[in-house]
Amino acid sequence: MATNAGTTIDPRYTKVAIWLHWLIGLAVIVNIGLAMLTEDMPREAHRAAMGVHKALGMAILALTLLRILWRLTHKAPPLPAGMRGWERWTSRLVHFLFYALLILLPLSGWVWMSAADRPIDFFGLFTFPSIVAPSKAVADVLHDRHETLGLLMLGLVLFHVLAALKHQLVDGDRLFARMNPF
Ligand code: HEM
Ligand code: HEM
Protein backbone atom coordinates (compact mmCIF):
# COMPACT_ATOMS: atom_id res chain seq x y z
CA MET A 1 0.00 0.00 0.00
CA ALA A 2 1.10 3.58 -0.73
CA THR A 3 -0.64 6.87 -1.13
CA ASN A 4 -1.10 9.26 -4.01
CA ALA A 5 -2.69 12.70 -3.50
CA GLY A 6 -4.29 11.40 -0.33
CA THR A 7 -5.84 8.40 -2.10
CA THR A 8 -5.02 4.89 -0.94
CA ILE A 9 -3.59 2.79 -3.75
CA ASP A 10 -5.25 -0.60 -3.62
CA PRO A 11 -3.51 -3.89 -4.33
CA ARG A 12 -3.63 -5.38 -7.80
CA TYR A 13 -5.74 -8.13 -9.29
CA THR A 14 -4.04 -11.55 -9.17
CA LYS A 15 -1.44 -12.27 -11.88
CA VAL A 16 -3.78 -14.82 -13.49
CA ALA A 17 -6.65 -12.29 -13.67
CA ILE A 18 -4.33 -9.62 -15.09
CA TRP A 19 -2.89 -11.86 -17.82
CA LEU A 20 -6.32 -13.21 -18.73
CA HIS A 21 -7.61 -9.61 -18.96
CA TRP A 22 -4.91 -8.56 -21.43
CA LEU A 23 -4.94 -11.82 -23.42
CA ILE A 24 -8.71 -11.67 -23.89
CA GLY A 25 -8.67 -7.87 -24.41
CA LEU A 26 -6.07 -8.14 -27.18
CA ALA A 27 -7.92 -11.05 -28.83
CA VAL A 28 -11.19 -9.08 -28.77
CA ILE A 29 -9.56 -6.05 -30.43
CA VAL A 30 -7.89 -8.28 -33.08
CA ASN A 31 -11.21 -10.06 -33.70
CA ILE A 32 -13.18 -6.84 -34.19
CA GLY A 33 -10.42 -5.64 -36.55
CA LEU A 34 -10.41 -8.92 -38.52
CA ALA A 35 -14.18 -8.74 -39.05
CA MET A 36 -14.52 -5.04 -39.79
CA LEU A 37 -11.32 -4.19 -41.64
CA THR A 38 -11.12 -7.15 -44.03
CA GLU A 39 -14.65 -6.86 -45.45
CA ASP A 40 -13.51 -5.08 -48.63
CA MET A 41 -10.43 -7.25 -49.18
CA PRO A 42 -10.28 -9.87 -51.96
CA ARG A 43 -12.56 -12.85 -51.24
CA GLU A 44 -9.74 -15.28 -50.35
CA ALA A 45 -8.03 -12.85 -47.95
CA HIS A 46 -11.35 -12.09 -46.21
CA ARG A 47 -12.15 -15.80 -45.96
CA ALA A 48 -8.73 -16.51 -44.38
CA ALA A 49 -9.22 -13.62 -41.93
CA MET A 50 -12.65 -14.98 -40.98
CA GLY A 51 -11.14 -18.43 -40.38
CA VAL A 52 -8.84 -16.83 -37.78
CA HIS A 53 -11.76 -14.70 -36.45
CA LYS A 54 -13.88 -17.78 -35.78
CA ALA A 55 -11.09 -19.82 -34.15
CA LEU A 56 -9.93 -16.85 -32.05
CA GLY A 57 -13.56 -16.19 -31.05
CA MET A 58 -13.90 -19.75 -29.78
CA ALA A 59 -10.60 -19.38 -27.86
CA ILE A 60 -12.04 -16.21 -26.27
CA LEU A 61 -15.09 -18.21 -25.17
CA ALA A 62 -12.90 -20.86 -23.48
CA LEU A 63 -10.60 -18.27 -21.84
CA THR A 64 -13.64 -16.30 -20.61
CA LEU A 65 -15.15 -19.36 -18.92
CA LEU A 66 -11.80 -19.86 -17.18
CA ARG A 67 -11.68 -16.17 -16.27
CA ILE A 68 -15.18 -16.16 -14.79
CA LEU A 69 -14.33 -19.26 -12.73
CA TRP A 70 -11.19 -17.49 -11.49
CA ARG A 71 -13.14 -14.29 -10.79
CA LEU A 72 -15.75 -16.18 -8.72
CA THR A 73 -13.07 -17.82 -6.61
CA HIS A 74 -10.72 -14.80 -6.24
CA LYS A 75 -12.10 -11.51 -4.96
CA ALA A 76 -11.31 -8.33 -6.92
CA PRO A 77 -9.26 -5.78 -4.96
CA PRO A 78 -11.39 -2.98 -3.44
CA LEU A 79 -11.87 0.10 -5.65
CA PRO A 80 -9.93 3.30 -4.84
CA ALA A 81 -11.52 5.04 -1.86
CA GLY A 82 -12.08 8.29 -3.78
CA MET A 83 -14.40 6.73 -6.36
CA ARG A 84 -17.95 8.12 -6.35
CA GLY A 85 -21.06 5.95 -6.02
CA TRP A 86 -22.14 6.32 -9.65
CA GLU A 87 -18.64 5.44 -10.85
CA ARG A 88 -18.68 2.23 -8.81
CA TRP A 89 -22.07 1.25 -10.20
CA THR A 90 -21.11 2.11 -13.77
CA SER A 91 -17.90 0.10 -13.58
CA ARG A 92 -19.78 -2.86 -12.10
CA LEU A 93 -22.40 -2.69 -14.86
CA VAL A 94 -19.81 -2.33 -17.65
CA HIS A 95 -17.74 -5.25 -16.33
CA PHE A 96 -20.85 -7.42 -16.00
CA LEU A 97 -21.86 -6.53 -19.59
CA PHE A 98 -18.34 -7.40 -20.75
CA TYR A 99 -18.59 -10.89 -19.26
CA ALA A 100 -22.08 -11.35 -20.76
CA LEU A 101 -20.86 -10.25 -24.22
CA LEU A 102 -17.68 -12.33 -23.99
CA ILE A 103 -19.97 -15.37 -23.69
CA LEU A 104 -22.91 -14.34 -25.92
CA LEU A 105 -20.84 -13.02 -28.84
CA PRO A 106 -18.83 -16.21 -29.52
CA LEU A 107 -21.87 -18.33 -28.67
CA SER A 108 -23.98 -16.46 -31.23
CA GLY A 109 -21.21 -17.11 -33.79
CA TRP A 110 -21.18 -20.81 -32.89
CA VAL A 111 -24.99 -21.15 -33.18
CA TRP A 112 -24.94 -19.13 -36.42
CA MET A 113 -22.24 -21.34 -38.02
CA SER A 114 -24.04 -24.50 -36.78
CA ALA A 115 -27.36 -23.36 -38.29
CA ALA A 116 -25.58 -22.39 -41.53
CA ASP A 117 -23.93 -25.84 -41.60
CA ARG A 118 -20.44 -24.26 -41.76
CA PRO A 119 -18.25 -26.18 -39.25
CA ILE A 120 -15.73 -24.11 -37.25
CA ASP A 121 -12.12 -25.20 -37.74
CA PHE A 122 -9.79 -24.51 -34.79
CA PHE A 123 -6.48 -23.50 -36.42
CA GLY A 124 -6.38 -26.81 -38.37
CA LEU A 125 -6.37 -28.84 -35.12
CA PHE A 126 -10.00 -29.97 -34.87
CA THR A 127 -13.54 -29.00 -35.81
CA PHE A 128 -16.17 -27.86 -33.31
CA PRO A 129 -19.39 -29.89 -33.23
CA SER A 130 -22.64 -28.30 -34.40
CA ILE A 131 -24.92 -27.23 -31.55
CA VAL A 132 -28.15 -26.65 -33.51
CA ALA A 133 -29.74 -28.30 -36.57
CA PRO A 134 -29.19 -26.57 -39.94
CA SER A 135 -31.80 -23.84 -40.57
CA LYS A 136 -31.55 -20.78 -42.80
CA ALA A 137 -34.05 -18.86 -40.66
CA VAL A 138 -32.03 -19.47 -37.46
CA ALA A 139 -28.77 -18.63 -39.27
CA ASP A 140 -30.20 -15.31 -40.52
CA VAL A 141 -31.40 -14.27 -37.06
CA LEU A 142 -28.07 -15.21 -35.43
CA HIS A 143 -26.13 -13.37 -38.16
CA ASP A 144 -28.10 -10.26 -37.27
CA ARG A 145 -27.65 -10.76 -33.49
CA HIS A 146 -23.91 -11.40 -33.87
CA GLU A 147 -23.40 -8.12 -35.71
CA THR A 148 -25.44 -6.18 -33.14
CA LEU A 149 -23.53 -7.75 -30.23
CA GLY A 150 -20.23 -7.07 -32.07
CA LEU A 151 -21.06 -3.36 -32.35
CA LEU A 152 -22.12 -3.29 -28.69
CA MET A 153 -18.76 -4.81 -27.76
CA LEU A 154 -16.93 -2.17 -29.80
CA GLY A 155 -18.87 0.60 -28.01
CA LEU A 156 -18.19 -0.93 -24.60
CA VAL A 157 -14.45 -1.26 -25.32
CA LEU A 158 -14.26 2.42 -26.33
CA PHE A 159 -16.14 3.49 -23.18
CA HIS A 160 -13.94 1.25 -21.00
CA VAL A 161 -10.69 2.63 -22.48
CA LEU A 162 -11.90 6.22 -22.07
CA ALA A 163 -12.85 5.48 -18.45
CA ALA A 164 -9.39 3.97 -17.77
CA LEU A 165 -7.73 7.05 -19.31
CA LYS A 166 -9.96 9.40 -17.29
CA HIS A 167 -9.00 7.63 -14.05
CA GLN A 168 -5.32 7.78 -14.98
CA LEU A 169 -5.11 11.32 -16.37
CA VAL A 170 -7.94 13.26 -14.70
CA ASP A 171 -8.58 11.56 -11.34
CA GLY A 172 -4.99 10.39 -10.87
CA ASP A 173 -6.27 7.54 -8.68
CA ARG A 174 -4.00 5.00 -10.41
CA LEU A 175 -6.84 2.56 -11.05
CA PHE A 176 -4.84 1.42 -14.07
CA ALA A 177 -2.07 0.05 -11.83
CA ARG A 178 -4.51 -2.62 -10.63
CA MET A 179 -4.40 -4.20 -14.11
CA ASN A 180 -0.70 -3.58 -14.78
CA PRO A 181 1.10 -6.90 -15.34
CA PHE A 182 4.59 -5.44 -14.85
C1 HEM B 1 -10.59 -4.87 -25.36
C2 HEM B 1 -11.28 -5.56 -24.58
C3 HEM B 1 -11.34 -5.43 -23.08
C4 HEM B 1 -12.19 -6.15 -22.32
C5 HEM B 1 -13.20 -7.18 -22.82
C6 HEM B 1 -11.98 -5.75 -20.93
C7 HEM B 1 -12.67 -6.23 -19.86
C8 HEM B 1 -12.49 -5.89 -18.54
C9 HEM B 1 -13.24 -6.41 -17.41
C10 HEM B 1 -14.36 -7.45 -17.52
C11 HEM B 1 -12.74 -5.84 -16.29
C12 HEM B 1 -13.23 -6.09 -14.86
C13 HEM B 1 -12.40 -7.11 -14.14
C14 HEM B 1 -13.16 -7.67 -12.95
O1 HEM B 1 -13.28 -6.97 -11.94
O2 HEM B 1 -13.66 -8.79 -13.07
C15 HEM B 1 -11.68 -4.94 -16.70
C16 HEM B 1 -10.93 -4.16 -15.83
C17 HEM B 1 -10.00 -3.23 -16.23
N1 HEM B 1 -9.62 -2.94 -17.55
FE1 HEM B 1 -10.31 -3.87 -19.20
N2 HEM B 1 -10.98 -4.80 -20.89
C18 HEM B 1 -10.56 -4.58 -22.19
C19 HEM B 1 -9.56 -3.70 -22.57
C20 HEM B 1 -8.91 -2.82 -21.75
C21 HEM B 1 -7.98 -1.78 -22.19
C22 HEM B 1 -7.56 -1.54 -23.65
C23 HEM B 1 -7.59 -1.12 -21.07
C24 HEM B 1 -6.62 0.03 -20.95
C25 HEM B 1 -6.73 1.14 -21.56
C26 HEM B 1 -8.23 -1.73 -19.92
C27 HEM B 1 -8.07 -1.36 -18.61
C28 HEM B 1 -8.68 -1.94 -17.52
C29 HEM B 1 -8.44 -1.55 -16.14
C30 HEM B 1 -7.49 -0.46 -15.67
C31 HEM B 1 -9.27 -2.36 -15.35
C32 HEM B 1 -9.35 -2.35 -13.81
C33 HEM B 1 -10.56 -1.60 -13.42
C34 HEM B 1 -10.89 -1.87 -11.99
O3 HEM B 1 -9.99 -2.13 -11.23
O4 HEM B 1 -12.08 -1.84 -11.67
N3 HEM B 1 -9.04 -2.75 -20.38
N4 HEM B 1 -11.56 -4.98 -18.07
C1 HEM C 1 -15.52 -12.35 -28.74
C2 HEM C 1 -15.45 -12.90 -29.95
C3 HEM C 1 -15.99 -12.23 -31.18
C4 HEM C 1 -16.07 -10.89 -31.49
C5 HEM C 1 -15.59 -9.69 -30.65
C6 HEM C 1 -16.71 -10.80 -32.78
C7 HEM C 1 -17.00 -9.60 -33.43
C8 HEM C 1 -17.52 -9.50 -34.71
C9 HEM C 1 -17.79 -8.27 -35.39
C10 HEM C 1 -17.58 -6.86 -34.80
C11 HEM C 1 -18.25 -8.57 -36.62
C12 HEM C 1 -18.61 -7.60 -37.76
C13 HEM C 1 -20.03 -7.16 -37.68
C14 HEM C 1 -20.35 -6.15 -38.76
O1 HEM C 1 -19.81 -6.24 -39.87
O2 HEM C 1 -21.16 -5.27 -38.48
C15 HEM C 1 -18.28 -10.03 -36.74
C16 HEM C 1 -18.66 -10.72 -37.87
C17 HEM C 1 -18.61 -12.09 -37.98
N1 HEM C 1 -18.31 -12.99 -36.99
FE1 HEM C 1 -17.69 -12.55 -35.13
N2 HEM C 1 -16.99 -12.07 -33.24
C18 HEM C 1 -16.57 -12.96 -32.29
C19 HEM C 1 -16.67 -14.34 -32.35
C20 HEM C 1 -17.11 -15.06 -33.45
C21 HEM C 1 -17.24 -16.49 -33.52
C22 HEM C 1 -16.90 -17.47 -32.38
C23 HEM C 1 -17.69 -16.80 -34.78
C24 HEM C 1 -17.99 -18.12 -35.40
C25 HEM C 1 -17.65 -19.26 -34.89
C26 HEM C 1 -17.83 -15.56 -35.51
C27 HEM C 1 -18.24 -15.44 -36.83
C28 HEM C 1 -18.41 -14.27 -37.51
C29 HEM C 1 -18.77 -14.20 -38.92
C30 HEM C 1 -18.96 -15.38 -39.89
C31 HEM C 1 -18.90 -12.82 -39.22
C32 HEM C 1 -19.29 -12.19 -40.57
C33 HEM C 1 -18.11 -11.66 -41.29
C34 HEM C 1 -18.45 -11.26 -42.71
O3 HEM C 1 -19.12 -10.24 -42.89
O4 HEM C 1 -18.04 -11.97 -43.61
N3 HEM C 1 -17.50 -14.51 -34.66
N4 HEM C 1 -17.83 -10.56 -35.55
Image: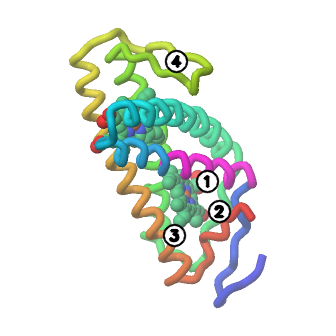
Question: Can you tell which of label 4 and label 3 is closer to the viewer?
Answer: 4
* Type of amino acid at the residue the image marks with label 1: Trp
Q: Is mark 3 within 8 Å of ligand 1?
A: yes
Q: Is mark 1 within 8 Å of ligand 1?
A: yes
Q: Is mark 2 within 8 Å of ligand 1?
A: yes
Label ID, residue 128: 4
Q: Nearer the viewer, residue 51 or 45?
A: 45
Residue with the most extreme right position: 1
Q: Which residues are magenta?
A: 15-28
Residue located at (56% from left, 24% from top): 122
Q: Is residue 89 found left or right of 15 in the rendered image?
A: left
Q: Determine the quadrant in which ligand 2 lies.
A: top left
Q: Is mark 4 within 8 Å of ligand 2?
A: yes
Dot 4, crowdedness within 10 Å: few (<14), some or many (≥20)?
A: few
The kind of secondary structure element at disc 3 is helix
Q: Is residue 55 above or below residue 93?
A: above
Mark 4 and mark 1: span between their CA atoms? 25 Å
Residue annotated with mark 3: 164
Do labels 2 and 1 touch, CB within 8 Å?
A: yes
Dot 2, crowdedness within 10 Å: few (<14), some or many (≥20)?
A: some
Mark 4 and mark 3: span between their CA atoms? 36 Å
Label ID, residue 179: 2
Mark 1 and mark 3: span between their CA atoms? 14 Å
Residue located at (44% from left, 55% from top): 93
